[in-house]
Amino acid sequence: MMKKRGMIFSLTSRLTLWWMVFAFELTALLAVQIPAVYNFSTFILYDAGSILRADRLLTQGLSPTIDFGYSYGMLSLIYGRLIFALGGQTPAMYLVGTWLMEMLVALGLARFAVRWNWASRTLLIVAAAHAVQPVYLALTHPMEAALLIHALADLADGRRARALALTSACVFVKPSLAFALGLVLLISLAWRLWRERSNERRLMKSLITALAPAALTASFCAALIAGYFGWRPLLNSILPFTARRSYAALGFGFFGNGRSFWRPELNGAGDFIWYYLTTPAGFWIAASLSLCSLCAATIFGFKAHSAKTNDRETLIALTVCHLFFVFALYAWPGSWSYYSYLLVLGVGTGISLFRPGVALMEWRNEESPKNAEHANITEHAENYRESASLFRVFRYIRVFRVFRSHWMWALLVLLALTGYEERYRAVAGDWRYSKRGAETAMLWADERQRAEWARVMEMAQRKRLLFLHNGCANLLFPAAQSPPSCFFSPGIQTPVEIAAIRRQIDTADVVVSFNHAAILDPWTWEEFADQRARFDVTWRGVYLTIHERLR
């Protein structure tokens, strides 16, 4: 008993230590990049400010997916309601809400680190800024990351029922990758139940034990959302049909709009080498290829009763989720950052599994029944040898060629380090050329942004001005009117929302638009074509354009 307590205390101490390491690292990364995240563009022009505006719409009694378009799950809106109720609808509270979720992410990373060797731990520390972003475009993303990482950590610990329960909750945060992970967990569960089919009583007990937590979690989340928002928003948000329509309209995809991340239009070999070395693209591509190789070797050499079964299942689950993201969920070029933690965790798990000495030992155990007995797999040695004989041709490759993991590790660490060059050069520019001021509500902004926004605000004092874009301009600058929308994207807006925006345009003297891609600029949409004809462009800046009503 004392020995068991000592082991638990040791594990808790190591987990706490690694949580503190990652919590400090993620907090430091946020602090270093504060001019880039607590920024005018982030909250006035882009998605993060839209989350603040969505919370304001909720306080006005509007319903998501009915009165305004919303493509994520409802749990993140409820989390936002709690955060903003505590400290107000401000950019600072948005960062607090993101940081709290990232502390849970740090705990999930620590749960993996305590299982790994030092090579994998070092890679995770070095690549942490690739794996976790200092601030996400919505509270949905860090919340989803926290749930998925802990679900995968539970799978690695053999707690499949809890992993499935967390995945079920994640469906109500963002109904996308959680479906893929849930399917992997259900297949794993079905396979284990199939092995117990001879004992009907044990089979039913195992089935109830595995599925009951997930069923209760899903029921609770559904009841909470239905009670707060109603059944229609719940049903509208549980499947990703709205997001798929928007993706199709925007031409999103790994081989579509996202292609410029991994295959940009550059002039020569030197430009490509520099790009892959100094941006996350090189690390992301190398890590993706490494992950697929590690997973392939895991499948070829999979041992159902090995002590490493949970880690191998986790590696397969991480690979499946990563590939599902790449081929089904990848959107714009920056989408790589949404699920890069899966990539880093997958490679770390694989490197920890396939250390050269461990791989050679497992290979020898497979060749010798005597060694297999010492490895505690005597009972299943013959069955395994029969199934593994089909893959005998892969063994030499798997042990001696594919998994010279120290070379793989060194390459990934190098690319992770060099891949920060572009980002931190931009951060250095933000520290140098941006500053905070009252004209931008104390958000960091460059000189051009401050000048253009001051011009818009001066006009808003004299005329009825509608800022027709994303962000939370109306929260920080009451003189500017904003539309009753969360985020503008083709296929997301509802009929009620479009009608409300048309009424705003009818009463506005000035409409200000952001110089964005035309398909994302609602002022160029067909729904407002007749009203657009009554306005004329009177000024165009780098960021903003002013349209005044014709007299």
Image (cartoon, rainbow, N blue to C red):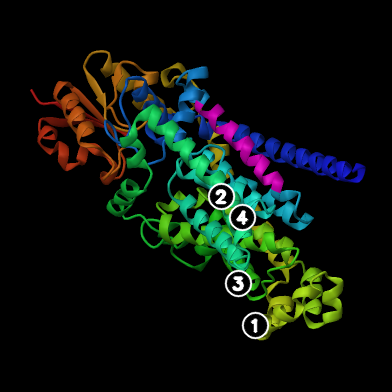
- In primary-sequence order, the first of circles 2 and 4 is 2
Q: Quadrant of the C terminus?
A: top left
Q: Which mark is residue 391?
A: 1
Dot 2 amino acid type: Leu
Where residue 98 sits in the image (x, y, percent)? 54, 33
Left/right placement of residue 154 relative to residue 435 reads right
Toward the viewer: 256 or 201?
201
Q: Is residue 104 magenta?
A: yes
Work out how far the residue at label 2 is from the one at label 1, CA to CA, in angstroms.
31 Å
Local secondary structure at mark 4: helix
Work out how far the residue at label 3 is from the one at label 4, CA to CA, in angstroms.
29 Å
Badge 4: residue crowd in 10 Å (few <14, some 14–19, many ≥20): some
Q: Are marks 2 and 1 in contact (CB under 8 Å)?
A: no
Local secondary structure at mark 3: helix
Q: Which residue is mark 3?
A: 296
Q: Which residue is mark 4?
A: 206
